[in-house]
Image (tube, rainbow, N blue to C red):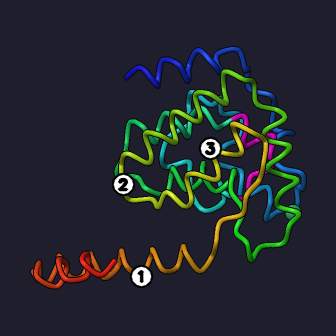
Amino acid sequence: MELIHRINAAWRSTPYPGDHVLSDCWCDECEFSVSSLRGKSWSQLKIADTNSETSQLNSSAFLYYLPALLELSLRHPDEIHLPCLINGRFIRCDTAPSDGETEIRELLRRLSKVQKHVLSDYFDWLASQGWQPLLLIEPAKVALATGRVEPFSYDEMMRWCRNREREISAKQSGQPELRKKRDLHS
Ligand SMILES: [Zn+2]
């Protein structure tokens, strides 16, 4: 896959920076949360190493493992927690405190132009998969292209989720008529 080659080319020269980047705090709990990553270069990362803790990684650790997350996500499109781990770092909800913006800006500052381009193409691929709403993908692309952080609407996202749930349950109960009707209204 062409995008995977470009990921490797854009991040090739980043050696494992050392355990110190994994966490800003080394209390037992924080140490445990990064234990699956210790000493691991990004090319060694496996899906099993990613979990809800991955979304808590500090910026340095996230940036270091980002190429691995991208590659795993492309190779395993069915692992839908992976794009959320990536995308979630570049978007901010309009109900969240605005200090999240600082972190996004820091990430943007530390990514090279080539890396931003690869990421943006990854988000295009993600949009083509169709199970994550564009309202969560577009702001990430805007941030990469312009540096502007445009919060997405929490209400809009919830509306999308509810529609999606209805769609899925309509499919499962085999009621295509219901779905058609709703599509006409939307
Ligand atoms: Zn701690």
Q: Quadrant of ligand 1?
A: bottom right
Q: Quadrant of the N terminus?
A: top left
State the separation of the CA atoms marked 1 and 3: 24 Å
Question: Of the residues shown, which amino acid type is indicated by label 3?
Answer: Lys
Q: Specify start and end residues of the magenta stretch as a single range.
A: 56-64
* Side of 60 relative to 72 (left or right): right
Image quadrant in which you'd find residue 151: bottom right
62 magenta-colored: yes
The one nearer the camera, 2 or 71, is 2
Q: Amino acid at mark 2?
A: Gly
**For the residue labelled by badge 1, is the local secondary structure a helix, a strand or a loop?**
helix
Relative image position of residue 83 (x, y in whole percent): 51, 50
Q: Where 41 sits versus 46, above or below?
A: above
Label 3 packing within 10 angstroms: few (<14), some (14-19), many (20+): many
Q: Residues within 10 Å of mark 2 (few under 14, many from 20)?
A: few
Q: CA distance from mark 2 to mark 1?
A: 15 Å
Q: Earlier in the sequence, mark 2 or mark 1?
A: 2
Q: Label 3, secondary structure: give it.
A: helix
Label disc, if present, on residue 141 of the rendered structure: 3
User: How far across and down, in percent of the image, does residue 100 sit?
Assistant: 82, 61
Image quarter hosting the C terminus: bottom left
